[in-house]
Image (tube, helix red, strand yellow):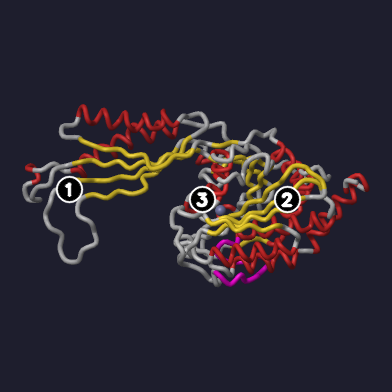
Amino acid sequence: MPCATLQPMTLRDRIASRVDSLQDRLVALTQDLIRIPTLNPPGDAYVPCAELIGAHMQRLGFTIEYVRGHGTPGDSDQHPRMNVVARREGARPGPCVHFNGHIDVVAVGEGWTFDPFGGQVHDGKVYGRGACDMKGGLAAAMIAVEALIAECPDFAGALEISGTVDEESGGYGGVAYLASKGYFSKPRVDHVIIPEPLNVDRVCLGHRGVWWAKIETKGRIAHGSMPFLGDSAIRHMSALLERFEHDLFPKLAQKRTEMPVVPPGARASTMNINSIHGGLGEDFSGFPSAVVADSCRLVIDRRYLLEETLEEVRGEVIGILGDLAEKRPGFRYEIEDMWDVPPTMTPVDAPVVQTVSDEIYRLFDRAAEHVISPGTYDQKHVWRIGHLRDCIAYGPGVLDLAHQPDEWIGIDDMVASAKIMALSAARLTGNL
Ligand SMILES: [Zn+2]
């Protein structure tokens, strides 16, 4: 008999109070995860972190698989790209809800007053690198699943938790690899929740698109005392930058989107000049020699909107390059695509959006905010490779704290989000 038909209201209350009773475990689990320094790059300590998650889930009756992203960027015997996937089948068939969290964290950086890998608790917060992005969210999902199973042991459907690597560097050894093996596709999985730190009362539907390209301008080397005998690649590049300033950037700022991107400044097209290098390198001691630069290289990071296509986005830059080649004497260039990801937005009426939003409303008595991330995250692979559309990011933590010194996660937020995740999973699997 389905658990919910016994006493539907009580099951809801029991799951929520079970999460409350697991608060100490939730904090301890978050601390344990933070204390494993899974720095990326280079991809340190992925194996013990995956094993910690695997051991915890195994105690809850899950079947554990360790899946190494063989041959993916950075994978080596010294730094194996080790993922963990835990699955528990219910007593009866039904939909599967999958919680996915990345286990890698970014470099510590300067300015910490807490031990970045200490997991110290202070004033209702757990501190450490990865606390909010996103070991706290992963721990909350693990506790959510534990509470659901404790109160509904003969649940229908299936539950999955994965801890995956390399999200901070594109997710190729993690979610992309797993998706290519069918781990993020139907019929195995129906609904995916990624507990990234988007704030406890917001549902993130997706992200803007991205296109990276490398542009090289070419010149001709000559003695620096007679630059007129050469042709400066740096001056050609500055002509391109000037066109970006006068033509492209104002045009991008005009392109507004219906996507609810946060922060609102990102509710337009943007382009960052990621890096520029020209002439002699800086890796010498002594005095530079006098030469005209024969090469200058630029990397651009263009973020685009659902209202744009990649062809348009590329066309804007290539159009300017072509125009310069026509009008500016000696202007020669090469452009190389580095990578691109289309924009992603799960429809508001998708089951996972509706269910999580409703649980947010019930707990906080206010409507969930639907947002779009300015940058991409692992949802891109779930869409692109897994072809699964019912996917969101929802989790505790303040987005602005990600990658900062003294990163923290609020314990109350973790508990609240664990309740919302547990109740949403109970509903999406048909148990509530
Ligand atoms: Zn993250």
Residue 167 is situated, as x and y percent measured from the top left of the image, at: 52, 52
Query: Label 2 sits on what residue type?
Result: Leu
Q: Which mark is residue 171?
A: 3
| Magenta residues (range) | 117-131
Q: CA distance from mark 2 to mark 1?
A: 58 Å
Label 2: state its secondary structure.
strand
Is 213 on the left-hand or right-hand side of 405?
A: left
Residue 98 is situated, as x and y percent measured from the top left of the image, at: 68, 48
> Residue at the spot x=55%, y=47% of the render?
378
What residue is pinned by disc 1?
A: 293
Q: CA distance from mark 3 to mark 1?
A: 36 Å
Badge 2 crowding class, 10 Å Cα cut-off, few under 14, some 14 to 19, many 20 or more, is many
Q: Earlier in the sequence, mark 2 or mark 3?
A: 2
What residue is pinned by disc 2?
A: 159
Q: Nearer the viewer, mark 2 or mark 3?
A: 2
Q: 327 or 364, which is in the foreground?
A: 327
Specify the quadrant of the image occupied by residue 344.
Answer: top right
Disc 2 beta carbon < 8 A from ligand 1?
no
For the C terminus, the quadrant is: top right
